[in-house]
């Protein structure tokens, strides 16, 4: 199981850097953003004109009280204009949201695509030190957070800025002193907002990290559910889950609580500004400087002025969550990829002889953990090479190096006298058919699974491979036969899955083979049948076979005996038994009672 002590990604650095990178994703949609800004400005202008017209209605009412003029036509006309203005504002806001939703979804689509490409560019060593759940959390939860919050934030930022500027201009045209009184609350709001942001940001980062850890644990427990049940570890795993869940709850509570303080603070300061406007406006009316309609307009404009400030408080919460998620995503995207290739050679699988040479190969997963020491070996075309040795001797590592899943620290590996480093990784992979200990079948039809390595395979070739693996009767007994859809609930045993992966490798028809304990999940009788089929498959092909049951590799042309990363013995079965060395002791140990 993976993820118990996996190292989590480093903590995000800062919001500014994150949004600078995010702006790069927004740049291709500048036209849409400009259209949204124009629509937002139009909507804001409509909202700004509203209080002015309402003030006119108040003035008409005052004229009726003082002079008896009813102004019925003027009031009706102004009311109709107000309805049109507010309807236009709503339409502009709707269209602005329409464009910005499109932008946010395109950004998230591009981000997911980049992540998908990045996953294929990362070396296997990256996944050796990270839990799958944390990687999945970045692809799903973090990108979803960016998508949802980006849409909300961009729309509100545009409308808030335009509304603030427009209201400010209108207030200045009415009274400079009253505008100054209304603006006094803004610095106080910004100071309090920055204080809350500085404290809450670390909790938003902690929340996203805790969510990734929890997802990693859930993925681990789900994939290893049978093992947990077998060892009665439900209570222990629940304790681990409870601790991770508690950490998420704690960080989420703190971040949400602190962010929730924004609106009450903004509303409190906004109410203070209302009081100041009413008091000063009352004094101006008494002094005869203003009419009542001016105070009404100022109160409404003050409300509109506080609205974007309160929205900024809300946006700040959204941006913090968006920043925490985007920093995790960008951290993933900036992980070092596998070195770029500039292959100078290409090997056509139809013409590969299958000669493989290891020259002074040294390799370690880390500087202080060397696995392979000065390994040398010459493999002739068509030979069957068995690799045996105790656990941790370097058998699978040797195969990983051969496939270029990892790069050697020093030395070289050659195929047909051509260094694999001068061939692209895709080219190297195409030369080998692999059957691994861990079976893997994706959700889809049996036909698609079997054609995974050879899209041009015909049904006749598939039938031939199934018959060689003694799976033809089983497949035809399934509903739909080759069109039967495999999923996680499909009634296919582990042994049957392994037989299907062997058939898939046969269909791929690569010039060389790698078999890593390929018959470990089948019964003894089936193993004999499969071994015969594999022997037929390996005829004329260079094959590397990793086996713990040494009885299955008696007919190997060359047996490499590894111990502590070194080849301590090599030869065929009879030669190694005659030496009565380490191989002989391994072979005889499987017959001991």
Image (cartoon, helix red, strand yellow):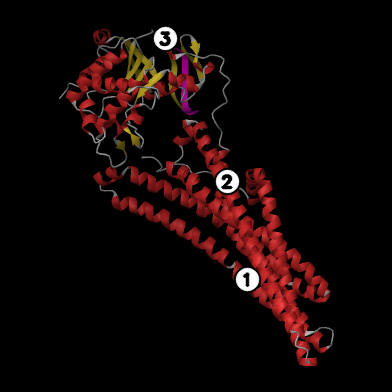
Instruction: Please state which of the two labelled residues, at mark 1 or mark 2, is closer to the viewer.
Output: 2
Compared to 163, does 512 lie above or below?
A: above
Helix, strand or loop at mark 2: helix
Q: Which residue is mark 3?
A: 355
Q: Which residues are magenta?
A: 357-368
- Residue corresponding to mark 2: 106
- Mark 3 vs mark 2, CA separation in Å: 49 Å
The answer to whether 579 appears left or right of 257 in the picture is: left
* Residue 94 placement (x, y as % from top left): 61, 60
Q: Residue at x 77, y 68 (%)?
A: 168
- Residue 316 among those drawn in magenta: no
In percent of width and height, residue 277 lies at 74, 79
Q: Is residue 309 left or right of residue 239?
A: right
In front: label 3 or label 2 = 2
Residue at numbered disc 1: 265
In this orientation, does residue 517 appear?
Answer: no
Q: Earlier in the sequence, mark 1 or mark 2?
A: 2
Instruction: Please state which of residues 4 and 71 is positioned toward the viewer in this rendering.
Output: 71
Prevalent SS, magenta region: strand
What is the x, y in percent for residue 190? 69, 65
From this view, report whether residue 209 is shown above or below residue 285: above
Outermost residue toward the left in this view: 593
Q: Nearer the viewer, residue 234 or 28?
A: 28
In this rendering, the answer to whether 383 lies above or below 47 is: above
* Mark 3 neighbour class, 10 Å CA radius: few under 14, some 14 to 19, many 20 or more: some
- Sequence order check: which comes first, mark 1 or mark 3? 1
């Amino acid at each position: 199981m993976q993820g118990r002590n996996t190292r989590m990604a480093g903590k995000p650095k800062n919001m500014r850097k994150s949004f600078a990178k995010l702006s790069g994703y927004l740049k291709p949609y500048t036209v849409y953003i400009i259209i949204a800004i124009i629509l937002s400005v139009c909507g804001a202008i409509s909202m700004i004109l509203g209080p002015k017209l309402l003030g006119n209605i108040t003035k008409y009412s005052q004229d009726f009280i003082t002079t008896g003029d009813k102004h019925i036509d003027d009031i009706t006309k102004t009311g109709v204009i107000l309805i049109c203005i507010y309807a236009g504002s709503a339409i502009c806001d709707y269209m602005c949201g329409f464009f910005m939703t499109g932008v946010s979804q395109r950004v998230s689509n591009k981000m997911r695509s980049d992540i998908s490409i990045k996953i294929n560019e990362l070396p296997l060593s990256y996944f050796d030190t990270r839990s799958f759940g944390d990687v999945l959390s970045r692809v799903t939860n973090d990108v979803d957070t960016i998508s949802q919050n980006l849409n909300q934030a961009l729309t509100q930022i545009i409308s808030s800025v335009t509304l603030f500027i427009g209201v400010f201009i209108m207030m200045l045209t009415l009274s400079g002193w009253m505008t100054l009184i209304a603006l006094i609350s803004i610095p106080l709001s910004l100071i309090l907002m920055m204080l809350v942001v500085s404290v809450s940001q670390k909790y938003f980062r902690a929340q996203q990290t805790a969510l990734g850890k929890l997802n990693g644990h859930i993925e681990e427990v789900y994939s290893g559910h049978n093992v947990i049940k077998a060892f009665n570890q439900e209570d222990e795993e629940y304790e681990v889950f409870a601790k991770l869940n508690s950490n998420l709850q704690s960080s989420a509570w703190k971040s949400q609580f602190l962010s929730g303080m924004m609106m009450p603070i903004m509303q409190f300061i906004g109410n203070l500004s209302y009081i100041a406007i009413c008091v000063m406006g009352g004094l101006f009316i008494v002094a005869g400087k203003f009419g009542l309609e001016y105070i009404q307009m100022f109160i409404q404009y003050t409300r509109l002025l506080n609205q974007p400030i309160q929205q900024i408080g809300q946006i700040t919460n959204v941006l913090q969550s968006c920043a925490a998620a985007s920093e995790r995503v960008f951290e993933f995207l900036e992980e070092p990829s596998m070195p770029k290739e500039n292959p100078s050679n290409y090997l056509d699988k139809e013409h590969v002889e299958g000669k493989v040479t290891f020259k002074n190969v040294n390799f370690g997963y880390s500087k202080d953990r060397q696995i392979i020491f000065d390994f040398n070996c010459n493999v002739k075309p068509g030979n069957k090479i068995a690799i045996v040795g105790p656990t941790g001797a370097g058998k699978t590592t040797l195969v990983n190096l051969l496939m270029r899943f990892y790069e050697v620290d020093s030395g070289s590996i050659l195929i047909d006298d051509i260094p694999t480093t001068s061939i692209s990784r895709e080219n190297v992979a195409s030369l080998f058919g692999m059957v691994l200990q861990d079976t893997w079948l994706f959700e889809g039809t049996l036909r698609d699974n079997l054609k995974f390595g050879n899209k041009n395979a015909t049904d006749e070739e598939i039938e031939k491979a199934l018959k060689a693996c003694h799976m033809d009767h089983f497949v035809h007994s399934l509903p739909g036969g080759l069109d039967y859809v495999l999923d996680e609930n499909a009634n296919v045993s582990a042994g049957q899955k392994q037989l299907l992966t062997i058939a898939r490798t046969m269909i791929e028809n690569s010039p060389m083979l790698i078999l890593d304990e390929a018959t470990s999940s089948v019964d003894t009788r089936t193993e004999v049948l499969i071994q015969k089929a594999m022997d037929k498959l390996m005829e004329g092909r260079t094959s590397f076979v990793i086996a713990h049951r040494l009885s299955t590799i008696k007919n190997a042309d060359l047996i490499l005996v590894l111990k502590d990363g070194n080849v301590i013995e090599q030869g065929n079965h009879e030669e190694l038994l005659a030496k009565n060395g380490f191989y002989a002791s391994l072979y005889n140990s499987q017959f001991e009672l």
